[in-house]
Every structure is written in structure tokens, then in C-alpha cells.
Image (cartoon, rainbow, N blue to C red):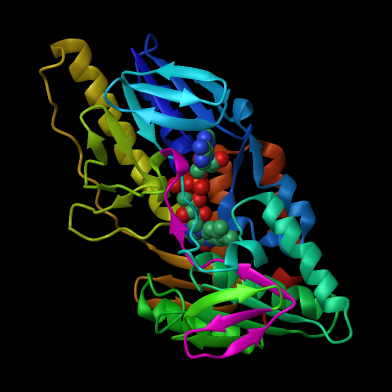
Amino acid sequence: MHVVVLGAGYAGLGLTKRLESSLPSDVDLTLVDESPDHLVQHELHRVIRRPGVANEIRLSLPGALERATARVARVEAIDRDERVVSLSDGRLEYDIAAICLGARTAYYGLEGVPEHGIPLKRLSHARQIRKRAREALRADDGGRIVVGGAGLSGVQVAGELAALAREEYGSASIALLEQRARVAPEFPENFGRAVERALEDDGIEIRTGATVTGADADGVRLESGERLPFDLLVWTGGIRGADALEGERPTVEADLRLDDRTFALGDAARVVDAAGEAVPASAQAAVREARTAAENVERLVDARRNGGEAVDPDLEAFRFESPGWVVSVGDEAVATVGSRVLTGRPARALKASVGLGYLSSVGDPGSVAGFAAREFLSERFRRDR
Ligand SMILES: Cc1cc2nc3c(=O)[nH]c(=O)nc-3n(C[C@H](O)[C@H](O)[C@H](O)COP(=O)(O)OP(=O)(O)OC[C@H]3O[C@@H](n4cnc5c(N)ncnc54)[C@H](O)[C@@H]3O)c2cc1C
């Protein structure tokens, strides 16, 4: 029997590591990713200001695995009827598959935005943003930065750019655009409001209810007719499904199954949990979904080995219970724990612990040590401002 996991992000790597210990040893397990490294995406914005962070948030896949085979190839298509994955370098047959391909940046057909806006999904994007931001900030009349989209990535990018400007150049004009009524609209209101305050304290102009209709080389157009000039446009305005899923993010219910042999989880899918709630696309949710998916793959493998095709086992239902949310805003952080909002040192400590906890669960000791040293020993952590 062959289980394949497509995509080695939070969902895919977490699922594979669990299956390594729970599946019988005669079940083959393959993890496919187009990159040889796992990227700790929720810290990616840090690379804009601290390029060295790249070494801490990129983990070699073979090093992270024990018995699963890591295959570096691009998933081109998935034939669920034939149970065959077409890869850039061949094909892969499977008995059970989990689609964990994450999401790509969505541009919603907005004219000029893909050409002139830089997304943030990869290390190369973070480096490109850094380069362009520093060029813009150096120019006498420059320093006008627009970030389109105020989800988890947009707010953290804006915070990082404001801190970069402060550290290296004094100041900049940074505007964060959000189509909906507040920042972090997919997340609890108390969290969104607290993040908004932290961004404003950082001098970032927040424009909610601002719908982008297009962009050219030096300005974005808003639905209101206004044109906002920029030296740098970062686009974090939304996500769409993987190309191998034709850009779709298929909906899965609480058992995380797309069909009787295929699971979909993480950003790759729209997950509706056991309470009927839509689960926000996030690293936090992907990690938790991986636990349920691992349990369900194991039950399916067991049923197929013992009862043949006819058996459809009871599967665990995923219920998303979030302990809270935490983001960085430059050197600061904002967190919610239940209904409590944390800022200052407790929030910074929480943000650092979340990163450290995750890295220790997947990482090599070098990355954990580097991350811990930066987060806990840095001057900014000792200050309580
Ligand atoms: C800057 C930033 C900050 C964020 N901050 C937070 C935060 O504070 N908290 C939080 O919970 N979430 C945060 N997020 C969101 C979080 O990172 C995503 O929700 C999370 O990465 C989703 O996990 P995933 O496993 O579904 O997908 P991913 O982590 O994106 O992994 C998908 C994997 O699939 C691989 N892949 C994709 N297509 C192919 C293909 N065709 N063939 C082969 N391999 C492929 C990719 O290389 C990747 O390894 C942030 C995101 C960004 C960009």
C-alpha cells in the first residue's frame, strides 16, 4: 500500500511526521514537494528586515523525515479516478493521498496588480520586497509603500516595513489597504482592533473599505476613483488554490476527505469543521488539521488492509478550537488568548514561544537555537516598551 502526501508545508509535513510513527512499516509513505525545504511561512515577513532569518525558517526535508521518502518534484495534476499524480519528473501511483499544496496569491483579475505588486509566499519574494523597499526608502522623494490586503501576512509585512524604515532611514509613508471594514477580518474582532491600534502606533495608515481595482507602475487605483502613488506595492490581497487543482480550493467537511481515498487540508482546501464553521486559512489550523488527517489516514489504511474496498471506517471529525492568535507588528506583537488581548512583553513572549514550539516540533537543533537566540536574547526582548 502506498500513501502519498502532496506538499510539505505545515499540513503536509505535520501529517507525514505523524504517519511515520503511526502507519505499519510495510506501508510506503512518500512526501512530495517542489522545494527540497520546508518553509516556516508564518515567520517569512521577518526576512524583509533580517535576511539571516531565512536560515532559521528553511528546514531540509530529508533531514526532517525518518522513514518517509522525500520526493522533490512539482505536482502538475492529480487524477483521483485513476489514483495517479503527474509530477514534473514522472508519475506516482497511490492508494491514499493527502493534498496539502497550500495556496497561491490571488489577483482576482485586477489589471496591473500581478505585474506591479510583489506577493509574499516564498523567500525570493521576501528578498525582492527588501531590495525594492530599501531602494524606495533611499530615494529623496521616495518611501511611499502600499500593502494591499490586511490579513495575517499583510499586517505583519506592513509592521516589518515600518520597522525597517525606522531602523535604516528614519521614516516612510506606509499605507495598508483592506477591502473589508477592519484589518484581519477573518479573525476575532478584538484581535483585529488590537492589531489596528498597534499598526497605527507604528505610523502605518490603515485604509479600510478600500477596494483596489487595478495598478500601474507607480500607483494603485481604488474603486472610489482615488489613485494612490507608490514606490513599492506589496500584494497580500488573498489566496487561491494550487494550479494542480485548477486554482480551486475545494470544500471539505470535518473528516477532511475529498473522496473515499483522498484528503485535502491546510490552505489547499476550504475546511468546514464539525461545528459547521469555516476554518480560517492559517498555519495554526493547518497544523491542527494534520492531526485529524493522520488519524483518518491511519483508520483508512487499517480498514483497507483488514476489510478490503467495501469497508468505510468511522472517521474523526475535525473541530477547530483555537487557543488564540498572535502576530508581530515590527518588534511588537499582539495576541489574543480567549477574550483577552495581550500586547507588550507577554505578546512578544507568546509570539516567540509559538515560533519556537513549532520549530522544535519539526526542526533541526541549529534552527531552533538560532531562532531562540534571536527572539529571547535580543535587545528588543529585554526592553519593555
Ligand atoms: C508572511 C506570512 C505570515 C503569516 N503569519 C501567520 C501567522 O502568524 N499565523 C498563522 O496561523 N498563519 C500565518 N500565515 C499563514 C500560513 O503561513 C499559511 O496558512 C500556512 O502556510 C498554510 O499551511 P499549508 O501547509 O496549507 O500550506 P504551505 O505552508 O503554503 O505549504 C504548501 C507546500 O506545498 C508546496 N507546493 C505548492 N504547490 C506545489 C506543487 N504544485 N508541487 C509540489 N509542491 C507544491 C509548497 O512548496 C509548500 O511547501 C502567514 C502567511 C504569510 C505568507
**Place of residue 107 in the rendered image (x, y in percent of width and height, measured from the top left):** 50, 63
Q: Work out whether residue 330 can be spotted.
A: no
In the depicted structure, whether residue 86 falls above or below residue 194: above
Q: Is residue 235 magenta?
A: yes
Q: Is residue 161 above or below residue 279?
A: below
Residue 298 found in image quarter: top left
Q: Name which residue lies at 14% across and 27% down.
A: 313
Task: Give left or right: position of 326 versus 265.
Answer: right
Taking the spot 53% from the left edge, 47% from the top edge, the residue there is 358
Residues 111 and 31: in front is: 111
The residue under the point 67% across, 37% down is 365
Above or below residue 146? Residue 322 is above
Q: Position of residue 258 (x, y in %)?
A: 25, 38
358 in magenta:
no
Using the rendered image of the protein, determine whether residue 276 is visible from the camera's viewpoint: yes
Residue found farthest to the left: 310
Residue 134 position in % (x across, y down): 82, 70
Q: Which image quadrant for residue 278?
A: bottom left
Q: Nearer the viewer, residue 42 or 346?
A: 42
Q: Which residues are magenta?
A: 219-244
